[in-house]
Image (cartoon, rainbow, N blue to C red):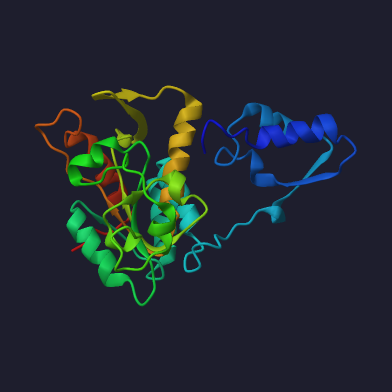
Amino acid sequence: MNTGEAGLGEWLRAVENRFSDWEVHASTLLEDRHYTVSQDAVELLRSPKITRHEDLHLSVSMRSFRAERLTSFVSSVLDGDVSSASEALASLGDKYPILLTRDLASAKNWLNGRARGSERTGLVASSGAHRLRPEGIHIKSAIDPKSWFLNDSQDVRSSYYLEDVATEFDIQGLELDWAGMCWDADLRMVDGSWQFNAFKGSKWQSVKSSTRQVYLLNAYRVLLTRARQGMIIFVPNGDAKDPTRPPTFYDQTYDFLRGCGIPELK
C-alpha cells in the first residue's frame, strides 16, 4: 500500500536469485493490475519455474462474511465500471446494505441505528482526505488504535463515538461491523474517469505518477472493504466559497456512485 513496501517483486527476485531450486506455485490472478503494480514482477511471474493455478486465488472475502460479491463491487467501482458495479451490487441484495448520503450527521445516525449488541461501528477516510476537516473529520489527528478498536461505546476514544476517524493505515488488516466511509476530493470522478489528487500546502495538486495513483486506489479499496456487515458512504456537498472544496469536486463522484446503484439514504 505504501512506498516503503517492496511488494511482490521482491519475493519473486528472492526466489529467482537465492532459491532457484524451489518449485513455485502461484495464483493466475497475480498478474492482474489490482494485485501487481510492478512490471518487473509481472515478468518474473512468467518464469517457467512458476506454475500458476486458478484455484489458488481466495475469491471470497473472509472479512465480509455476508457479501461474497463485495470485492467484485469495489473493484468495479474503482475501475469506473458502472455496469459491472451495478450488477455486483444487485447480487448482494439486502445481505450487505450500502447507502449514500451527503449529510454526515445522517450517516452517523444510520450507523448507530444498525449496530446491535457488541457490533462495532466507526468512521474511516483516506489519509489524503485533508479537506474533510471542515466537516469535522480531521485525518491528521492520530487515533489511539487500542482505544479506537477495543474500548466500549462509553469511551469517547472508541470508534463507537464516531468522532475520530481511522485511515487506511490504521485499519488495514482489521475490520468493523458497520463503517461510515468518508470520501474526499483526493479521488474524484471527472467526466467518467477517476482523477487523482494530493493536497499540498493550500491547494490540490494532480498526481501524475501511475504508481502513486495505484496506491491511492488501493487506499480506497481498503476503506471500502473494512465493514463486515454493511456501510454508508458520505460524500460532502463542498462549499462554493471555498476553492479547495467546491461542489464540482464532489458532485460527479456522488452521481457516479449513485449510478452504480447505491441507494441514497432517505
Location of residue 179 (image quadrant): bottom left
- Residue 49 visible here: yes
Residue at (24%, 36%) from the top-left corner? 131
- Horizontally, is 190 left or right of 84 in the view? left
Q: Report x, y in % for residue 210.
A: 48, 26
Residue at (26%, 68%) from the top-left corner? 112
Above or below, 160 against 184 in this view is below
Residue at (46%, 23%) from the top-left corner? 209
Q: Report x, y in % for residue 237.
A: 17, 44
Residue extending farthest to the bottom is 117
Location of residue 128 (image quadrant): top left
**Looking at this view, is 93 or 218 the one in front?**
218
Q: Quadrant of the C terminus?
A: bottom left
- Residue 221 visible here: no
Q: Report x, y in % for residue 115.
A: 33, 71
- Horizontally, is 91 left or right of 204 in the view? right
Q: Count the marks: how many?
A: 0
**Looking at this view, is 181 or 82 the one in front?**
181
**Looking at this view, is 138 or 47 the one in front?**
138
Residue extending farthest to the right is 21
Q: Report x, y in % for residue 16.
A: 81, 31
